[in-house]
Image: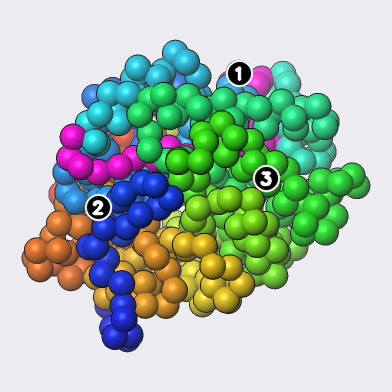
Amino acid sequence: MTMPDTISTDRIDPFSPWKLRTLELPNRFIKAATFEGHCKGGKPDREGLGAFHEAFAAGGTGLCTVSYGSIEPGGRTFNDQMCLQDDILDDLKEVTDRIHKHGAKTAIQLAHCGNSSKWSGWIGRRARGPSNGFNALGTFVGTPFARALKKPELAELTRQYRSAAERAIKAGFDAVELHMGHGYLLSQFLSPAVNKRKDEYGGCAENRARFPVEVLQAVRQGVGDAVPIIVKMNLRDGFRGGVEIKDSIVTARLLEANDADALVLSGGFSSKNAMYLFRGPTFVEELIKVQRRKIDKLVYRMARPVLKSQPFEELYFLELAKQLRTEVSLPLICVGGVQSLSSVHRALAEGYQAVQLGRALIHDPALVRHYQQGLKTESGCTVCNLCVAEMDRDGVRCVLNDALPARTLTE
């Protein structure tokens, strides 16, 4: 699984400090925003969520990203996601304090699910997205259709993004990550397969990026000049008719021109081709098993077509990212298949400024320290993807660490 270490003589040291706007980061390693499963009923579990992220900070990760802070109640895909309102700020402050005491910094991912909600609060109502459409996730919980957002609603959502970002800073977060990928609301606007609007928010790539850019502008106004804004975006949606690299280049240029600080270059669309993001064997059967409600089991059975296994390789977004690298100058962050130290070095040699790790850190929260001390050169993660299914049991964990059966890439 190790990649050849083709490194230039002027390579970036991944363990060196890194300044992102005014934020001093201890190194180039970032914990990716992976849903943790520690927000039952939408309220963060101080102990569970705090311990989850503190382990990465204690293990040497420079920036820990807390996953999916919905900007408003209707922006959740399901009940156990946090909504970044005033009533949870004390809980989040305890989480950020636990991260900071180890010298690490922390960001929170700001998101809205758009037309893909199965949150029970929307029962009997229509989810909202760029255009009228079908909400496959909500079919069995009373929200099978989505309607197009009206312009006043777009303005209100923009204000809610700004308010959520301002609350995040109050809760002690050092940076925010705007989620513009993976088929959530801002990604839906960017995708020609989903965005069928005829007004100034639809049509060409520049128009489809208009609402995401307005959100970025509002968040910048809210957090001020000192706070870094990271954007996670798709290089490709991973299905025919979706975002392709030519579209993502247009978006990246606009984000750079509107004061984004770094781009996390990802891919995949949760409602259409989720495994384009994960790669490796599917986890859908395990996800079905851990559901407590029959209706949720049915929903995930229906999701089997979008959760088919896909071949895994290290740095699987690299070649697309290299095309975008020539078009923008702002920092790029690598995510996807960073499973070894040689992958880290190659990513930094190929034009990235930092790396985001998900599954590798879930397997070994102290991986960064182990790399730095020469104790490891490989993560030990087998990319079985079973950690994803654990989010609906007692929170995300690596099944290898619990001595449970797990698959390997050869299975």
Amino acid type indicated by mark 2: Pro
Instruction: Find residue 391 and report its image quarter.
Output: top left
Whether residues under marks 1 and 2 lie with C-beta atoms below 8 angstroms apart, the answer is no
| Disc 1/disc 2 C-alpha distance (Å) | 41 Å
Describe residue 307's horizontal placement relative to residue 406 as left or right.
right
- Neighbour class for label 2 at 10 Å: few (<14), some, many (≥20)? some
Horizontally, is 177 left or right of 103 in the view?
right
Write down the residue under mark 2: 26
Residue linked to disc 1: 121
Residue 136 lies left or right of residue 380; in this view the side is: right
Q: Residue at image x 79%, y 33%?
A: 149
Q: Horizontal and vertical percent for residue 43?
A: 41, 20
Residue 177: x, y in percent? 48, 44
Magenta stretch: residue 106 in it? yes
Name the residue rendered at 26%, 70% in the picture: 13
User: 10 Å neighbourhood of mark 3: few (<14), some, or many (≥20)?
Assistant: many
Disc 2 to disc 3, how far (Cα)?
A: 30 Å
Vertical order, 390 against 12 (above or below): above
**Whole-percent x, y for residue 154 in the image:** 75, 32
Please tell me which of labels 2 and 3 falls first in the chain.
Answer: 2
Q: Residue beneath label 3, please?
A: 212
In this rendering, the label closer to the viewer, 1 or 2: 2
The colour scheme used to paint the residues is rainbow
- In the image, the segment drawn in magenta is 101-123
Tag 2's secondary structure?
loop
Residue 294 visible in the current orientation: no
Amino acid tagged 3 = Pro
Tag 2–tag 3 contact (CB < 8 Å): no
